[in-house]
Image (cartoon, helix red, strand yellow):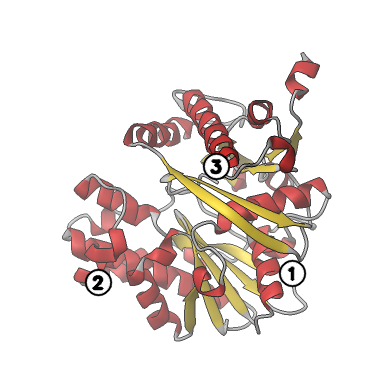
Amino acid sequence: MSGTSMDGIDAALIETDGEGVVRMGASVELAYTEEERALLRQALADALPMKKRTERPGVVGAAERLITRKHADIISDFLKEHDLSPEDIDVVGFHGQTVLHRPHERLTVQIGDGQALADSLGIPVVHDLRAADVAEGGQGAPLVPAYHQALVREAKLAGPVAVLNLGGVGNITYIAEGHDPVAFDTGPANALIDDLMLERSGVAMDQDARQALAGQVNQEMLVTLMTHPFFGEKPPKSLDRNAFSRETVAGLSTRDAAATLAAFTARSAAAARRWLPREPRLWIVSGGGARNPAILKFLREETGATVRTADEFGWSASMMEAQAFAYLAVRSLKGLPLTFPSSTGVPRALTGGVLATPGQSRLRA
């Protein structure tokens, strides 16, 4: 998984039937260099005029080659480190890197060559997991709810439970007995904070929320940020990484700006409750935001509920999405639904993904 925060690649090994059984194995993360991040950021900019998902304007093609090569490297190194062979792995779930997400135009673009990855590794690869949903009128996001539901059910947690993933943007999964998961994007998560810190300090993160915890939330600006029309839209709904601007906090000190943006992440997540069937009794936070104590503090204040991290349940806050795309790859192989009307707004429960088999490109040639 290479997420919207663009900090690096996560790879995780799981064993699953794609339904209720999940056994978590080892995992690894590979950080992008500053030069690689700069290329990916430029790819986001160059992707803006895209009208067809096959186009590769500007540096988008170069970024796709980078993404594919880096994923091949991390998986190959992982197998060697854990004394595994390609034959030990049934399938790789490959999300790629989102450079454009406009479901209202039935357009979502995740760069990464699934066939080239399969050929390089000698392992079948399921990729392009969002496209089928968007083509059928769904939001194409969030995709992780099916995995969230499997984890909550296996843990036998009393619902309703909200699983909040805080990557570049935030998304929530509401899980209650007898219901398909209700899910949608909530608003910004780490993207605005990361971009602020990159601009102000040259490092794209607020380590341990040191800046945010030392600052003061500007309540007036927080109210202004919450006037964004996205929050009034009824789900299903999803966001592009750059849907929100940090210009509102441009005049604040770094500390106060970081605090205000962390509070914005928490308040926008809490505001999602208006669209849920019932108030969640428990919030479980995953993604990079689970390592931000300021966001967790503000979320507890905003919801008045129990807020815990995925790690506290023996899950993995940092590897949740990587594990999820492995899980979804298995569901894709079995023709099981990846998305639901209650999660993406797709007209019916829908499977997805494209299977690339090693050597398939040579056969076609």
Which mark sits nearer the N-terminus, 3 or 2?
3
Q: Residue furthest front?
A: 83
Q: Residues within 10 Å of mark 1 (few under 14, many from 20)?
A: some
Q: Residue furthest right?
A: 335
Answer yes or no: is residue 138 visible: no
Q: Which residue is mark 2?
A: 217
The local secondary structure at tag 3 comes to helix
Residue drawn at x 47%, y 70% is: 269
Q: Nearer the viewer, residue 109 or 332?
A: 332
Q: Relative to residue 304, is residue 19 depicted above or below?
A: above
Q: Residues within 10 Å of mark 3 (few under 14, many from 20)?
A: few
Which mark sits nearer the N-terminus, 1 or 2?
1
Q: Relative to residue 14, is residue 355 depicted above or below?
A: above
Residue drawn at x 44%, y 24% is: 59
The amino acid pointed to by label 2 is Val
Q: Which residue is mark 1?
A: 180
Q: Which residue is mark 3?
A: 81
The amino acid pointed to by label 3 is Glu
Report the disc number at residue 144.
none
The amino acid pointed to by label 1 is Asp
Q: Nearer the viewer, mark 3 or mark 1?
A: 3
Is 32 on the left-hand or right-hand side of 206?
right
Q: Nearer the viewer, residue 148 or 183?
A: 148
Q: Work out which quarter of the rendered image holds the C terminus and state it.
A: top right
Task: Give residue 38's position: percent from left, percent from top.
Answer: 35, 34
Task: Give residue 51's position: percent from left, percent from top.
Answer: 57, 31
Task: Give residue 226's position: percent from left, percent from top.
Answer: 39, 67
Task: Give residue 197's position: percent from left, percent from top.
Answer: 26, 52
Marks 3 and 2: CB-CB under 8 Å? no
Residue drawn at x 36%, y 66% is: 292
Residue drawn at x 63%, y 61% is: 236
Answer yes or no: is residue 154 visible: yes
